[in-house]
Image: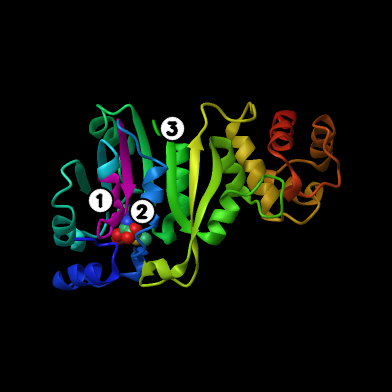
């Protein structure tokens, strides 16, 4: 059965009495050109893939045929009978019924992928947890190589923007600190059932061995990043002091030391500027 086909997917879901829950971000893919391209970004002979939110299993089945093992984490247990049917021929797939944000992923990856050379992540992410999931994957120092995920088009634009550009946000800097980000391709809203109100895009994050800049205090670096983007269009010298609880003179001295203009706006700082400012404030 080809469940990337709207008619077949509908009949499987109807047979099991399944109804979509908007609150769980349940928009299932019905475009059979999308899954092969997503799988291609993370697949390989000895690759284990962690999938988040298999839904009816359309991407799961694709990953199963191109990777060594797939472990899929799904929160909605109503999908049990659906996945039993759609994945009955996929013998290298394991489903973990849990919330991705509550799992001890370090242990899961170590136990499930011990015999794989590489671990990647692939998902059509539920949109309500896009940023928390991506940041959790990046910040947890997991043994992951590549993440290929579908996100809302606006989120893709922000996550993959150049740091220092108008499209960037605090999350752009955070992603850039841990990974190289690129947009692979766009996916129109009509590729899903039910169709969401926005278009989507698949992005690829390739995790870095080490950050692109050296900072002596990561906590302070991210505090500064947050402060810079909180009032991004205002002169940094006038806004960041309060948030960081420092004197204006101290910030002025640090800006000079980091060769950054005193009239700079937070949103225009590059990764190197942000790192230099952090190090100058220590
Ligand atoms: N992969 C399927 C596809 O592409 O058709 C379904 C993707 S759908 C956008 C998101 C899936 O994530 C749903 O199956 C939903 O139940 C599941 N989900 C939502 N919140 C979750 C969570 N916190 N942990 C794990 N899965 C979750």
Query: Does residue 263 lie above or below 86 as drawn?
Result: above
Residue wearing tag 1: 61
Q: Earlier in the sequence, mark 3 or mark 1?
A: 1
Point 47% across, 72% down: residue? 197
Question: What is the span of residues highlighted in magenta in the rendered image?
Answer: 46-64
Give the class, few, some or many, for how many residues have Cα within 10 Å of label 3's Cα (few <14, many ≥20): few
How far is disc 3 from disc 1 in space, using C-alphas? 28 Å
**In terms of image quadrants, where is residue 33?**
bottom left
Residue 141's mark?
3
Point 63% across, 51% down: residue? 169
* Res 92 seen here: yes
Point 67% across, 51% down: residue? 229
* The magenta stretch spans residue 129: no
Is residue 15 rendered to the left or right of residue 116?
left
* Res 125 seen here: no
Q: Earlier in the sequence, mark 2 or mark 1?
A: 2
Q: Secondary structure at mark 3?
A: loop
Residue wearing tag 2: 35
Is residue 237 rendered to the left or right of residue 109?
right
Question: Mark 2 CB in 8 Å range of ligand 1?
Answer: yes
**Contact check, label 3 and label 1, Cβ < 8 Å:** no
């Amino acid at each position: 059965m080809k469940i990337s086909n709207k008619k077949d997917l509908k009949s499987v879901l109807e047979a099991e009495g399944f109804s979509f829950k908007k609150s769980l971000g349940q928009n299932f893919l019905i475009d059979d050109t999308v899954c092969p391209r997503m799988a291609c970004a993370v697949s390989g002979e000895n690759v284990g893939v962690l999938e988040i939110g298999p839904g009816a299993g359309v991407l799961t089945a694709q990953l199963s045929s191109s990777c060594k093992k797939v472990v899929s984490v799904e929160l909605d247990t109503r999908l049990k009978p659906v996945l039993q049917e759609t994945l009955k021929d996929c013998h290298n797939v394991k489903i973990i019924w849990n919330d991705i944000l509550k799992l001890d992923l370090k242990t899961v990856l170590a136990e499930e992928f011990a015999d794989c050379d590489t671990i990647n992540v692939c998902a059509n992410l539920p949109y309500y947890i896009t940023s928390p999931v991506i940041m959790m994957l990046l910040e947890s120092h997991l043994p992951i190589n590549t993440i290929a995920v579908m996100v809302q088009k606006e989120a893709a634009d922000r996550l993959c923007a150049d740091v220092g550009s108008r499209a960037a946000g605090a999350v752009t800097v955070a992603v850039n600190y841990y990974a190289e980000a690129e947009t692979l391709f766009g996916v129109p809203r009509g590729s899903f059932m039910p169709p969401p109100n926005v278009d989507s895009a698949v992005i690829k994050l390739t995790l870095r061995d080490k950050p692109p800049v050296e900072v002596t205090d990561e906590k302070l670096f991210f505090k500064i990043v947050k402060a810079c983007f909180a009032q991004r269009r205002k002169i940094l010298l006038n806004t960041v002091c309060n948030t960081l609880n420092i004197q204006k003179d101290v910030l002025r001295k640090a800006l000079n030391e980091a060769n950054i203009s005193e009239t700079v706006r937070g949103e225009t700082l590059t990764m190197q500027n942000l790192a230099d400012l952090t190090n100058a404030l220590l």
